Image (tube, rainbow, N blue to C red):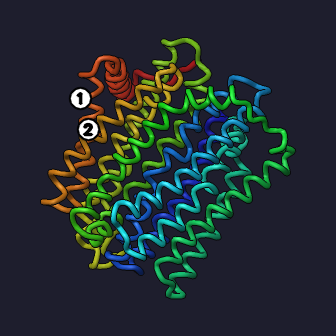
Amino acid sequence: MKSSILSFIWLASEKLLRIFTGVFVGLWLARYLGPAQYGVYMYALAWVGLFNGIAWFGVGDNVIRSLVRNPGSDDEVLGAAFAIRLVGSCAAGVLAVAGLYLSGRHEPALLELVILMSLAIPFAETPAVIFLFFQSKLAIAVPVMLQNGVRVAAAGLRIAMILGGCSLAWFGAAVLAEAVGIFIVLLGLYLVRGGSVLRWTYRWSAIRSMLVQGTPIAVAAVIASLAARIDQLMLGWFTDFVQVGMYGAALRFSEFWWTFAPILMNSLSPKYVFNIDDPQLMRRNIMRIKAAMLGIGLAPVLLILLVGDYAIPLLLGQQYAAALPVLYVHIFIAVFIFFDAPLAHYLLATNRQAQLIWKSVFLLAANTVLNLWLVPAHGAVGAALATLCAYALTLLVFYRLVRGYRDLGQLQTGALACLWRLARGRERWRSG
């Protein structure tokens, strides 16, 4: 338990620093650029983000699971994961640029940003393999500190660009510079600690096995990525970049909370999910984790409801006043994100990762239909409502009505019962 807590603390420190760069610097950038140019910047981020599922191709939690369950296979696992991520990230970058051009969006500022951000994809995705290696060993203190150092430097670079009055394209270059910096420090640490990329093996059998495991996750990730960004993309398509800027400003206050859900799960899963052979014990662990995650997910909602009226006008000015109702709707998505996060790890641990695809398909379909209905009439607020309702329908309806997912609905019910017993003082955390 102690090692899991320490792992969470170190991972959380990185995310807290991302809060500084993503919120403080990001909001400063929003104020500097104004709603229209900031909308272009956020649209570029959303567009490139669509292709992240291709870039990492499902090579994430299954790497940690393989390293934990098969000691001595490090070089084979890392070699296979690196090969997949390298090819996937290069393909993602090419598709992002080509897709934007073919879509008919030829605005020079937008195209410049997408090209620069696409160049960053290989440098951002390939060193993640090394980070997963350290994470599987629960030895992430130094990797996190090095990444934090790069992020501080990148934040300083962005601040210098704002003070220097740089144009929009320079902030795309900053994304590339940050990715290159993290690539260098993680690779350097791995080599200093005695690792050698020359020892990595690239056996087709290992690559194929990882692809088989990762393909459902990758397909689900691509669909989920589209579902998560369809709101911003449809805003840019049906309205204008000012609405995208308003929506993006609200996201700066709400979306960063979502990053804590996978941090918590990546810290707990090696001990309480992936390392458990008893199905009943695993289900009990998942229910308790879900109960805790639901409680945690309510925290940002309460915080934003208390300070939202003051935060946006103070930090962004009256030019972003229209972002307030967007924020009040969008922040409630955090509750569903936290409550649902343990189920992805449960499906992976039980070799049911293919089911992630159909869940993501339903989420995407619901989000798309709702956006088509709400965005033209209500703009940024409609996009936030559409996304919130899509998550609610997925967790509360899809899991209970679709055969094969009903046990996930039962886990939700069990988690709520667990939370009720905990509130009454009749439940304690126990695990094998």
Which amino acid type is marked by label 2?
Ala
Quarter residue 45 falls in: bottom left
Above/below status of 1 relative to 304: above
Query: In screen coordinates, is 259 left or right of 205?
Result: left
Which amino acid type is marked by label 1?
Val
Rendering coords of residue 238 (x, y %): 21, 62
Q: Sort mark 1 into few (<14), some (14-19) or many (20+) by Cα contacts within 10 Å.
A: few
**Residue at the left extreme?**
377
Quarter residue 423 falls in: top left
Mark 1 and mark 2 lie on one chain; the one further toward the N terminus is: 2
Mark 1, secondary structure of its residue: helix
For the point 40% across and 40% down, which residue is it?
338
- Measure how far apart labels 1 and 2 are at the Cα level: 8 Å
Query: What label does residue 231 carry, if any?
Result: none
Rendering coords of residue 184 (x, y %): 73, 59
Cβ–Cβ below 8 Å for labels 1 and 2? yes
Placement of the C terminus among the 4 image quadrants: top right
For the point 46% across and 30% down, which residue is it?
289
Query: What label does residue 397 carry, if any?
Result: 1
Is residue 315 visible in the rendered image? The answer is no
Rendering coords of residue 212 (x, y %): 56, 27
Query: In screen coordinates, is 393 left or right of 228?
Result: left
Camera-nearest residue between 367 and 121: 121
Mark 2, secondary structure of its residue: helix
For the point 12% across and 60% down, which residue is it?
377
**Residue at the front extreme?**
102
Rendering coords of residue 197 (x, y %): 80, 45
